[in-house]
Image (cartoon, grey):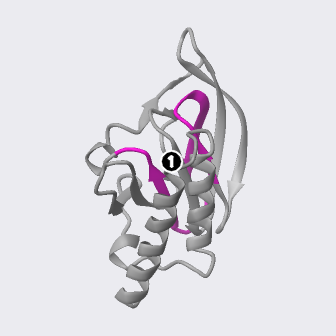
Amino acid sequence: MCLALETNNLTALTRAIDAAMALPPDRLPGAVQHALQASFADGNWLTPAQRQPDPQRYARHVLQADAQGRYTVVALVWQAGQFSPVHSHHTWCALTVVQGELQEHYYACDRQSLRATPLHWQPRAVGAGSSGTDGLDQVHRLGNAGAEMAISVHVYGVEAARVATGVNRVLALAS
């Protein structure tokens, strides 16, 4: 992969996200999702280092951290069988799949017990995406049920230092 191509694509993506930041909060996640999908419409431009998996859990690779701390762009690399925990978000988020296929499982959240009940799931192939706001209205679990590695690129509305701890609100399943 040519570094100039990766840099040009990432620059164009961050410019599109910067423009979306001026939108009302309810429109921001969808606009960022569309920017992600457009950025990868011609293929996966991530470098080999940004595609490296972790055998223990899905790997996170920060691609871009906004200088003002408004968002962070992260590549998540999923080996076969790796899933996130069931969670909602403390911030807005958007994603697109750039390699392989993922499953996104949706849940209803009981606000009293903070326990999640499965609703349905959606396959996410290359080019597919989703987005959401913060809170308990969108509880999900993302992962790779296939045999091949998958990669998704996410944008979270937090500074890079908070990506590991300030994004997910992990929820237990209802019994």
Magenta span contains residue 13: no
**Image x and y of residue 170, in percent:** 45, 30
* Residue closer to the observer: 22 or 87: 22
**Image x and y of residue 113, in percent:** 54, 11
Q: Is residue 128 left or right of residue 91?
A: right
**Image x and y of residue 42, in percent:** 61, 82
At x 48% / y 74%, what residue is drawn?
12
* Residue closer to the observer: 35 or 116: 35
User: Relative to 3, does residue 60 appear above or below in the rendering?
Assistant: above
User: Relative to 78, does residue 26 appear above or below in the rendering?
Assistant: above
Which residues, given as a range, are shown in magenta? 130-158
Q: Quadrant of the N terminus?
A: bottom left
Magenta span contains residue 131: yes
Main SS, magenta region, reads: strand
Badge 1, how many Cα within 10 Å: few under 14, some, many 20+? Answer: some
Judged from this view, the residue extending furthest toward the left is 161
Judged from this view, the residue extending furthest toward the top is 112
At x 39% / y 91%, what residue is drawn?
2
Q: Is residue 67 left or right of residue 169?
A: left
For residue 92, say whether it is visible: yes
User: Relative to 166, does residue 44 appear above or below in the rendering?
Assistant: below
Q: Which residue is mark 1?
A: 83
The picture quadrant where one finds residue 111 is: top right
User: Relative to 5, does residue 65 appear above or below in the rendering?
Assistant: above
At x 48% / y 80%, what residue is drawn?
45
Judged from this view, the residue extending furthest toward the bottom is 2
* Residue closer to the observer: 141 or 14: 14
For residue 145, say whether it is visible: no
Q: Secondary structure at mark 1?
A: loop
Tell me which amino acid carries mark 1.
Phe
Q: Quadrant of the C terminus?
A: top right
At x 51% / y 50%, what residue is drawn?
22
